[in-house]
C-alpha cells in the first residue's frame, strides 16, 4: 500500500530522524512518501524512500514564532506567502498521490502553528473532496506542558475525530501518555504503544570504530553531541573547557569527539580547542553517530528523544545528559530512565568547565551503569501493526 508520512521539524532534528526510522521499517512492505517542511538536513534517505519537500518553515527557540528557513529571523521572509504555497502544494500532492494511509507526526498534540495546511487536508478527506485515506497520528512519548491544559485537551480530542488511530512511540512502563495528557481515557480511537523508535548499531560497531580511531583498551573516548545544535552552545563550550582540563590527567588517556549538530557552528569551538591537539575532534555532523556512541566510554549530550534512545541502543556505559530547559520533556524522560539505565542528569550548575570535568572524571573512573531493558523496537512494531490494521480495518466512509 502507499503511505504518505507528514513530518515538520521546527527547531531540532529529532522528529525528522525518528520518522526516517519509521519509514525504513514501513518500506519493507509498503511504498512510502515522506513529506517534510523544515530546514534541510543533509542525510542519506532509506533506499526506496521518496521525499517531497514543502517550502521550509522553522520556529524560534520559544516556539512562539514561525519564520522562513534561510531568511532573516527578524521577519524578512514572507511567511504568509509560504503558507499559502505550502497549503496548495500539500493538497495537490494528496490528490495526485492518493495514498492509502496518511501518517502525521505529532499533530494534533503539537504543531498547532501548521494547522493552516493540515486542517484543509483533513477536512477534504472527511468530506470526500480527496480520495479515501486512513489517517494515523505518530506521537512521541512525552508532551510538553501547556498554559491551559484543559483547553488544549479539548482541542486535541476534537481534532482527533479526523484520525483513525494513535501510535505512541514509547513504553507505558517508563512513561504512560496519561502523565502528560490527562484526557487519554476520552480518546475514542485505538491507542497503541509501540516501544521506542531508534536505529540500532551492529554488534561489532564499537570495536570497529575504536580500531579505526586507533584507540586501545586504556584510552577513554568521550562523545559530545547537541542534537540539531541550535540550543546546545553552552554544553559545547563547557565540554571543550572540561576537556582542556582532563587532557592534562594522563592517567585517563582521554579523547573527545564533539558534534555541534547540523545547525551548530564548529568554527568558534575549533579556535578554543586549537591548543589541545589531535585528541579532540570537532565536527558539525556525522552519519557514524551510532558507531561513535558504540565506541564511547562516556557520552555528554542533550536529552532529546532520538539522542537518548541512540544512547540506549548503542549500550553506552555512562552518559551525562543536560536537558533542554524550555519545557519538561527532556528532564522528565531522563529522570525516569536513569532509574534503569546508565543515564545521569547534568544540571545547569554543572555546566562550567571545572564542574563538568569533575563529573566526567568521576564517571570515567567508576564502573559502568546498569544495562537498559527499555523496549527499542518501536519502528518494527509500528510497521507490523499498521500493516495488519490496513489489511483488516474497515475503510472510513464519507458523507
Image: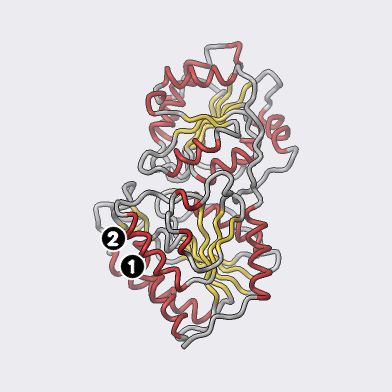
Looking at the picture, does residue 203 appear above or below residue 197? Answer: above
User: Going by the image, does 296 lie left or right of 110?
Assistant: right
| Residue at (55% x, 70% y) in the render | 4
Looking at the picture, does residue 368 appear above or below residue 283? Answer: above
| Residue at (30% x, 51% y) in the render | 147
Q: Along the line of sight, which residue is nearer the eye, 155 or 84?
A: 155
Query: Mark 1 Cα within 10 Å, few/some/many (few <14, many 20+)?
Result: some
The quarter of the picture where the N terminus appears is bottom right
Residue 71 lies, in percent from the top left, at 31, 56
Disc number placed over residue 77 in the picture, else none: 2
The residue sitting at the right extreme is 204
| Residue at (64% x, 46% y) in the render | 375
Q: How is the image coloured?
A: secondary structure
Give residue 191's quadrant in the image: bottom right
Query: Mark 2 Cα within 10 Å, few/some/many (few <14, many 20+)?
Result: some
- Real-space Cα separation, disc 2 to disc 1, in angstroms: 9 Å
Element type at marker 1? helix
User: Going by the image, does 201 lie left or right of 322?
Assistant: right
Residue 167 lies, in percent from the top left, at 56, 60
N-terminal of the two: label 2 or label 1?
Answer: 2
User: Going by the image, does 274 lie left or right of 293?
Assistant: left
Give residue 101's quadrant in the image: bottom right
The residue sitting at the bottom extreme is 399
Looking at the picture, does residue 227 appear above or below residue 224? Answer: below
Q: Circles 2 and 1: CB distance less than 8 Å?
A: yes
| Residue at (47% x, 15% y) in the render | 245
Element type at marker 2? loop
Q: Along the line of sight, which residue is nearer the eye, 131 or 327?
A: 327
Q: Along the line of sight, which residue is nearer the eye, 40 or 330?
A: 330
Q: Dot 1 corresponds to which residue?
A: 82
User: Going by the image, does 219 lie left or right of 166?
Assistant: right
Disc number placed over residue 375 in the picture, else none: none
Amino acid at each position: 500500500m502507499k503511505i504518505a508520512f507528514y513530518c515538520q521539524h521546527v527547531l531540532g532534528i529529532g522528529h525528522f530522524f525518528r520518522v526516517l526510522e519509521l519509514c525504513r521499517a514501513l518500506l519493507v512492505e509498503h511504498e512510502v512518501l515522506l513529506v517534510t517542511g523544515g530546514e534541510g538536513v543533509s542525510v542519506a534517505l532509506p533506499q526506496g524512500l521518496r521525499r517531497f519537500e514543502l517550502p521550509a518553515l522553522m520556529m524560534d527557540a520559544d516556539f512562539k514564532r514561525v519564520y522562513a528557513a534561510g531568511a532573516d529571523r527578524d521577519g524578512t521572509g514572507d511567511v504568509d506567502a509560504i503558507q499559502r504555497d505550502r497549503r496548495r502544494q500539500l493538497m495537490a500532492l494528496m490528490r495526485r498521490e492518493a495514498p492509502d494511509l496518511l501518517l502525521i507526526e505529532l499533530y494534533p498534540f503539537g504543531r498547532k502553528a501548521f494547522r493552516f495546511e493540515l486542517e484543509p487536508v483533513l477536512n477534504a478527506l472527511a468530506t470526500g473532496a480527496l480520495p479515501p485515506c486512513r489517517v494515523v497520528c505518530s506521537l512521541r512519548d512525552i508532551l510538553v506542558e501547556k498554559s491551559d491544559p484543559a483547553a488544549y485537551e479539548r482541542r486535541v480530542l476534537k481534532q482527533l475525530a479526523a484520525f483513525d488511530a494513535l501510535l505512541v512511540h514509547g513504553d507505558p512502563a517508563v512513561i504512560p501518555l496519561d502523565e502528560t495528557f490527562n484526557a487519554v481515557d476520552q480518546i475514542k480511537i485505538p491507542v497503541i504503544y509501540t516501544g521506542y523508535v531508534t536505529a540500532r548499531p551492529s554488534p561489532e560497531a564499537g570495536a570497529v570504530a575504536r580500531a579505526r580511531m586507533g584507540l586501545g583498551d586504556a584510552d577513554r573516548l568521550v562523545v559530545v553531541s547537541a542534537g540539531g545544535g541550535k540550543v546546545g552552545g553552552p554544553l559545547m563550550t563547557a565540554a571543550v573547557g572540561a576537556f582542556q582540563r582532563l587532557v592534562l590527567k594522563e592517567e585517563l588517556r582521554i579523547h573527545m569527539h564533539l558534534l555541534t549538530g547540523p545547525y551548530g557552528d564548529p568554527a568558534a569551538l575549533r579556535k578554543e580547542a586549537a591548543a589541545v591537539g589531535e585528541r579532540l575532534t570537532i565536527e558539525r555532523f556525522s552519519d557514524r553517530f551510532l558507531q561513535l556512541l558504540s565506541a564511547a566510554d562516556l557520552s555528554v549530550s542533550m536529552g532529546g528523544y532520538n539522542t537518548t534512545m541512540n544512547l540506549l541502543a548503542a549500550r553506552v556505559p555512562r552518559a551525562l545528559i543536560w536537558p533542554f530547559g524550555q519545557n519538561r520533556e527532556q528532564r522528565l524522560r531522563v529522570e525516569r530512565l536513569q532509574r534503569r539505565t546508565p543515564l545521569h542528569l547534568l544540571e545547569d550548575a554543572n555546566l562550567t568547565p571545572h564542574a563538568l570535568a569533575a563529573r566526567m572524571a568521576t564517571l570515567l573512573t567508576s564502573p559502568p551503569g546498569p544495562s537498559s531493558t527499555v523496549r527499542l523496537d518501536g519502528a518494527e512494531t509500528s510497521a507490523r501493526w499498521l500493516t495488519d490494521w490496513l489489511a483488516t480495518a474497515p475503510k472510513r466512509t464519507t458523507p
